[in-house]
Amino acid sequence: MSRFLPLFALFLFVACSSEAQESSSADEMGDMTIEEFEPISTLVVDENIVTRAKFPFVDVHSHHWRAAEMSAGAVDTLIMEMDEMNMAVVVNLSGRWGEALRGAVENMESRYPNRIVTFANIDFRGFGNEGWTENAVAQLRADIEAGARGLKIFKNLGMDVLDTEGNRVPVNDPRMDPVWALAGEMDVPVLIHSADPPNFWKPRDKYNEKWLELKLRPNRYRPPGEYPPFEQIMDEHFDIMRKHRGTTFISAHMSWLGNDLDALAAKLDEHPNMVTEMGAIIYELGRQPRKAKEFLTAYKDRVMMGKDSYNPEEFHTYFRTYETLDEYFPYYRKYHAQWRLYGIGLDDDVLQHIYYKTAMNVIPGLDPSLFE
């Protein structure tokens, strides 16, 4: 029996040493959460940071909420930043209506008439009151005559807009038909954002790609019963395009189909009066560079450059994704996409269409000399 004691003592020593090492390692790791996990890639590959677009471009999806109140210096700074990025034109989708719209057009466009484009919005207050539709049509007509070059519809239509009886107003509510028709009659596009990423409707579990975003931004979750299903809202979205073939619709955020480009292609084929833009969706294209290049090449005259929130440094990720063949580089907002991106390496002709040629066919009054 005694001859086994040294072996047993050695076993205890090894086991205790192992536990001590594990405890020490755990102490070093601390209580870091997945939200804090920001690994630095050890991959050694070419890096081509692009801070200026290869060709002049139109940002068809931007928001400058206080356009009517911006100081002359602030507008000058905006133009300077645009020049540094090679942004020829910015489209402010937050022009509002009436006096605010006229103020935005006057303040933003008077000194830089070819560089800033303003879209009007709709005031949905009192929807369902007698004469609401006629007043909305009259207001949009006045806003276009005052300089608005398009109409922007926010995602509250179809989700949060209620009529005077407390009922949800669907995107394809027939009371909106005269508004869509007027846009076509006056030859201005309608940029319409409906719904949100479909993952916002899915269970917030370990299988949801947007788990981190929903954890950090819980107000973005769409609980069953509080909102109609994603599919219903988007069916309403595409229905207005089907009913109003004479109106050009810009389906925002690639119709939330950046993860299924074949489905988006089918929608573009079905609706010849529909175009789209890539605001806040580049993380989808950058994880499927070969498929994205195939799609963007085939539909170059139906897709436009858009960014959504205005931040000059974030544009660099768009340029890098479009123009380079870089591998495995980060997206600028971790909670949007935990994965890394790959450059698509678009051909010059495709780049020119996405950057400005398609926009010139969609948005009235763009100055061709800006793109020479």
Image (cartoon, grey):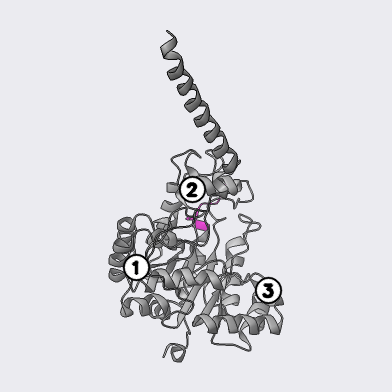
Residue segment shown in magenta: 168-175
Residue at the image position 43 percent from the left and 19 percent from the top: 7
- For marks 2 and 1, the one nearer the N-term is 2
- Residue, disc 1: 344
Q: Amino acid at mark 3?
A: Ala
| Cα–Cα span, label 2 and label 1 | 23 Å
Q: Main secondary structure of the magenta part?
A: loop
Q: Amino acid at mark 1?
A: Ile
| Cα–Cα span, label 3 and label 1 | 40 Å
- Residue, disc 3: 100
Q: Position of residue 17 (x, y in %)?
A: 52, 30
Q: Secondary structure at mark 3?
A: helix
Does the magenta portion include 218?
A: no
Q: Position of residue 50 (x, y in %)?
A: 45, 75
Q: Position of residue 312 (x, y in %)?
A: 56, 73
- Residue, disc 2: 210
